[in-house]
Image (tube, rainbow, N blue to C red):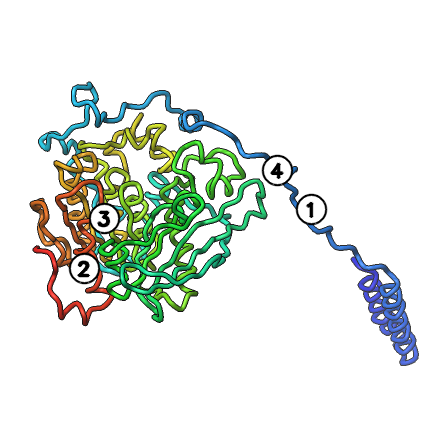
Amino acid sequence: MCLFCEALKSAHLSLFFGSRLSGGFMARRFYFCLFVFACSIVLINAQDTPPKKDDPPPKKVEPKDLPTPLVLTAAEDHKKMLELLKIKELRRGANGNDPKASNAANYDESKANPYPKLPDPLVFKNGKNVTTAEEWNKTRRAEILEDFDREVYGRVPKNVPSVKWEVTDTSKGKVGEHDVVIKKLVGHVDNSSYPHIKVDIQLTLTTPANKEKVPVIMEFGFSFGGMKGGPAPAPKSGSWQDQIISKGWGYAIIAPSSIQADNGAGLTKGIIGLCNQGQTRKADDWGSLRAWAWGASRALDYFETDKSVDAKRVGIEGLSRYGKAAIVTMAYDERFAIGFIGSSGAGGVKLHRRNFGELVENLASSGEYHWMAGNYIKYAGPLKWDDLPVDSHELVALCAPRPVYISCGSGKVEGGWVDAKGMFEAGVAAGPVYKLLGKKDLGTKDFPKEETSLVDGEIAFRQHNGGHTVGPNWPSFLKYAERYFEPKKSDEKKDPLPK
């Protein structure tokens, strides 16, 4: 108890009992004066007492006090993850190069569906049915995201640092015959918590000259700069960039490798390594796909501040592994308005439970595991594909009610590795969620012939007659996107490609 309280207590007791014993006015006055005197003494002493020192400020972390990033090969890091998961052996992935190999990739449709029953996106974990849009948006969607976080793509850590965008160059140029403004940007990731690793996200933004608030399609692409020592060549007339600019829209290219390396050796570097202070991942830590998607979201943060961009009309596009990143981006960040998902295959839109082309075992190998959470590896070892709590149709469903355009090439030219039908079936199985939210599904369960445009609903699908590219589908996609970005103009024109 403090001195003031002790004095107050003593004086009060003296006053009380003194007055009771003496019964006189003078006694009460004497003890009241004594009480005031005691309080004054305490206050004087309190002023003379030096203030208690605050706790010393936390010591600034110096780089020399932090562990240096581990240097591991992909095989070494993969082995450490297997040890963490207590897995001694994995099943072999499919061999897509040698049809005579014992583990040759299967392209026989009669053997493609060993687990035909998919998880139902409209059934809660407790077994009850999802019957309203509110139930989906408030509860069921979160359940599915949690499963993808924990078992498939990994969690974005809570300590992920902020990004400060810098426009490093602004120039005028041409795309085809159109005047444009080109901005080069770098997103500096705050590395004050771990200065050993530096992450600078590379992004370019190209918009029509003298226009503001335009729609933008962002592509997962490659580093800007072109050939060493010179600028990137200007896009030619008829290129996908020219097609976008011709509509009065803009396009952006983000470099995934500037966010996170596309290999297992890089997991102790990049944004994942920065958050882990250069150490190895936990079993549910994010992989490269989730990291690339995080980077795309940070680019969208910048677009929200740029007056040339309408941030509510930004789409995401990618091919192959970047197609995987594009669908992950759409699923996790509801600000993206539309997705153009090119030949994403396993780990993307293709069903994990399909035995056709690339398999779960391929994704779990030392060459591809870095795309996924460590936990995903379990489903190529002690567990089966059917043990996965989710499948890729639910990844598409997470995009609802926003439109998703699924693209792939010819089975004869691109090949069956990406499993066009497996991606189509994922689109079909996502349909009930879109319909629950008042949108249209693919409109059919029958796999269409090549170059058939299924574009009437918010889930779209088209298999062009080319190879591993989205090129032939750009005109169809842009017409599809126009319906959402410029609905009045879309009503006045016909689809340039047959349905």
Expressed as whole percent of the image width and height from the top left, the position of residue 385 reads 25, 32
Identify the residue at image location x=78%, y=55%: 53
Image spot of residue 207 (x, y percent): 34, 63
What numbered label is drawn on residue 480?
A: 2
Where is 263 relative to 226, above or below? above
Q: Secondary structure at mark 1?
A: loop
Quadrant of the image containing the N terminus:
bottom right
Q: Quadrant of the C terminus?
A: bottom left
Q: State the separation of the CA atoms marked 3 and 4.
A: 44 Å
Q: Which residue was labeled with disc 4?
A: 66
Give me the residue at 45% from left, 45% from top.
229
Q: Earlier in the sequence, mark 2 or mark 3?
A: 3
- Of the residues under marks 3 and 1, which one precedes in the sequence? 1
Q: Residue at x 17, y 49 (%)?
A: 472
What amino acid does circle 4 point to?
Answer: Leu
In the image, which disc is placed on residue 121? 3
Q: Position of residue 139 (x, y in %)?
A: 31, 54
Is 270 positioned to the left or the right of 18 in the image?
A: left
Q: Nearer the viewer, mark 4 or mark 1?
A: 4
Q: CA distance from mark 4 to mark 1?
A: 13 Å
Q: Amino acid at mark 2?
A: Tyr
Depth check: give the residue in front, 32 or 320. Answer: 320
- Per the image, label 4 sits on a secondary structure element best described as loop
Q: Nearer the viewer, mark 1 or mark 2?
A: 2
Closer to the N terminus: mark 1 or mark 2? 1
Residue receiving disc 1: 59
**Which amino acid type is shown beneath numbered disc 1?**
Lys
